[in-house]
Image (spheres, rainbow, N blue to C red):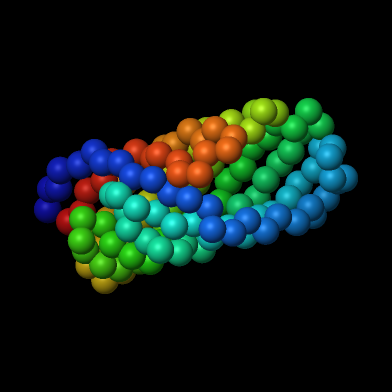
Amino acid sequence: MTSTTTPSAGTFTFKDWQETVVAGDEGGARLARATVVNALSGAIEATATTCLYAISYAADGTGSFSGFQRCEGAVDGRAGTFTLREWGTFGERGRVNCSFEVVAGSGTGELTGLRGTGDYVAEPGQSAISYSFDRSLD
């Protein structure tokens, strides 16, 4: 079956961020892990997601991250769950650039067959962060 990719957008907010240093020293080059809860609206509707990130900080405060976000909610009014794989970088002033994709085969319920990619740029102090999401659903 062929499906058409639909471009869309939305916003998300951080509801909780818990970060732990696992190697190195706080304030210097280090590795950390973070568990995060987000709320998404727009293309993806999810009141609370579960996220797990691995973060590598350089001594100057810049760094990169990768992780997964499990979303329970709806896309285009179709309910279910799916997982996003995320990766990105951040600068010493806090700007975050992130790309993400739906993990193949992770969709459940009415979201079985969901595919898609997206991205966002987050500036320090933003309460709602805009994202783009190009997706298809068989």
Residue 130 visible within the image: yes
How many numbered markers are drawn? 0
Left/right of residue 57 with respect to residue 138 in the rendered view: right
Quarter placement of the C terminus = bottom left
- Residue lying at the far left of the rendered structure: 1
Q: Nearer the viewer, residue 123 or 75?
A: 123
* Residue 29 percent coordinates (x, y): 82, 37
Residue furthest right in the image: 25
- The quarter of the displayed image where residue 114 is located: bottom left
User: Residue at left 59%, top 59%?
Assistant: 16
Coordinates of residue 22 in the picture (x, y in percent): 79, 54
| Residue 57 placement, left or right of 95 | right
**Residue at the image point whose x is 14% and y is 47% from the top:** 3
Please state the horizontal and vertical placement of residue 66, each as a whole percent of the image: 58, 46
Q: Is residue 84 above or below residue 10?
A: below
Indicate whether 79 appears above or below 59: below
Asked whether 29 or 42 is in front, the reply is 42
Task: Give coordinates of residue 69: x percent, y percent.
Answer: 48, 57
Work out whether residue 62 or residue 2 is closer to the camera in this orientation and state it: 62
Give above or below for 14 relative to 110. Answer: above
Horizontally, residue 54 falls left or right of residue 50, namely right
- Residue 68 in sight: no
Which picture quadrant has residue 108?
Answer: bottom left
Between residues 129 and 5, which one lies in front from this camera angle? 129
Residue at screen point 51% across, 63% down: 50
Picture residue at 84% right of the left edge, 40% below the top: 27
